[in-house]
Amino acid sequence: MSVYALEKLISETRRLATEFRHATGQMLPVTGEIARFDAARQLDLELLEPRIPGVDAAGRGNREGRRYQIKGRVILDEGKAGYRIGQLNPNGDWTHVALVLLDSEFEPYKIYEADREEILKALSQSTGKRSKRGAMSVAKFKAISLLAWTRENGLENEVWSNY
């Protein structure tokens, strides 16, 4: 499939997911695929097919040699606490995690990235059943990661830390 055809399909998926949420109040389970597409496009990553467990994409250019696990989350209310990202695979052969934040219309507005050491350290310091399964809040991920891309500025020239 050509990149143009995939871009059209993702665009239509965004539209359908938005309409479905407005009509039913429920989310279609498409956030992960949209996030994979957006991370690859905005961060210059190559999506891996066939997929390797725990690894969605490989870095190119400035990110050459990195293997990414990609997560996505629709944020409907920035002021609301409690958003969580999907379960991380701590045993996968990834070096970095990219978190794509999507708005209410499933459009990306920020992408954060964190390296494996920071993720595993944060998971080991957390208590509870969720952290043992590789779950993490969006707020925690933002705190240990770097902002890599924004809708307003594109790729950040000097990626800045939240530390």
Image (tube, helix red, strand yellow):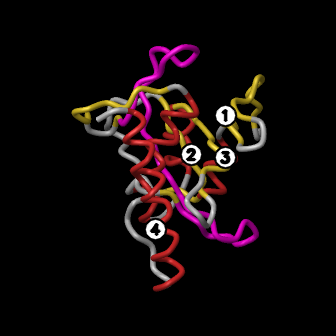
Callout 1 crowding tier (Cα within 10 Å): few <14, some 14–19, many ≥20: many
Compared with residue 45, is residue 30 higher up or lower down, i.e. above or below?
below
Three-letter residue code for mark 1: Ala
The residue under label 3 is 110
Between tags 4 and 1, which lies in front?
4
Residue 29: % across, % down: 37, 65
Q: Residue 17 shows which numbered tag?
A: 4
Compared with residue 33, is residue 156 higher up or lower down, i.e. above or below?
above
Residue closer to the observer: 90 or 38: 38
Would you say the residues marked 1 and 3 are in contact, meaning their CB atoms lie under 8 Å apart?
no
First of labels 3, 4 by sequence position: 4
Q: Residue at x 77, y 42 (%)?
A: 152
Three-letter residue code for mark 2: Ala
* Residue 138 shown left or right of residue 79 in the figure: left
**What is the magenta range?**
56-84
First of labels 3, 2 by sequence position: 3
The residue under label 2 is 122
Q: CA distance from mark 1 to mark 2?
A: 19 Å
Q: CA distance from mark 4 to mark 1?
A: 26 Å
The residue under label 1 is 148
Q: Residue at x 56, y 47 (%)?
A: 100
Q: CA distance from mark 3 to mark 4?
A: 19 Å
Residue 132: % across, % down: 41, 56
